[in-house]
Amino acid sequence: MMENEAIYPQCDRLLDQLSKFDSELLDLGGYINDDRFRLFEKGIGFNLPLDFKYILTLHNGISLMGTKVYGLDDDLKESSLNKVYHFEHLGAGNPMPAHFLPFSPDGTGNHYCLDLSKITDGLCPVVFWEHDVAYLSLNNVEVCNKSFTDWMQQVMIDWTTDDYNYDGSEK
């Protein structure tokens, strides 16, 4: 099996684990059934990783107890990938490089980003962009996870279940 063929079952397992959370804690956006990813990719000049497109096609935007993954829809206003991408690259005081796609805010102006310049076998690393750091080199931007699904497992699921049960009660 080619490595990228294993991406989708891994995504499905991750979504099954995510769905164990009580619906009061988890908000999963609706299905995307149009060409907005293709248009977005064309607009930014980069392909998106397969795991990211697959998960967001099934759930256009995800929120779990304050941890958010932006969706791709103008109706989401300032929480849409296209609006955030545009602002972080053209409107921010410390603009991101074009190949960083901010997909999840930390609540203080920083973002987890996909490094779209490093897609290999359909996946790319996740980096943490600090909006108030003047990076002397992009090598100084912290690489957090090897893929979007690894980030979701660690940040959304593992960090939440470290302190909370699936029903939201504290451990």
Image (cartoon, grey):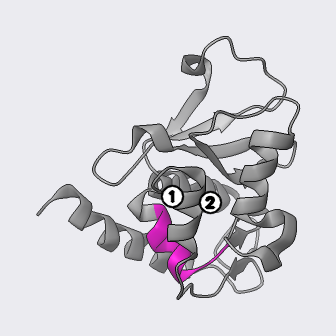
Residue farthest left in this picture: 1
Residue 105 visible (yes or no): no
Q: In this view, does 165 lie above or below 105?
A: below
* Quadrant of image for the C terminus: bottom right
Task: Name the residue rendered at 48%, 76% in the picture.
Answer: 15
Q: Is residue 59 magenta?
A: yes
Label of residue 34 in the image: none
Distance between mark 1 and mark 2 Cα atoms: 6 Å
Task: Name the residue rendered at 49%, 72% in the picture.
Answer: 55
Q: Do the residues labelled 1 and 2 touch (CB within 8 Å)?
A: yes
Specify start and end residues of the magenta stretch as a single range. 52-61
In-front residue for pair 107/57: 57
Q: Which three-letter amino acid code belongs to the residue tagged 1?
A: Gln
Q: Can you give x and y, in whole percent of width and height, for residue 43 in the image?
A: 60, 57
* Quadrant of image for the N terminus: bottom left
127 left or right of 1 in image = right
Q: Which three-letter amino acid code belongs to the residue tagged 2?
A: Met
Label of residue 153 in the image: 1
Q: Does the magenta stretch include residue 56?
A: yes
65 left or right of 46 in image = right
Identify the secondary structure beneath mark 2: helix
Q: Is residue 155 above or below residue 13?
A: above
Residue carrying label 2: 156
The main secondary structure of the magenta stretch is: helix
In-front residue for pair 151/37: 37
Q: Can you give x and y, in whole percent of width and height, for residue 135 in the image?
A: 70, 17
Among the 4 quarters of the image, the one containing residue 13: bottom left
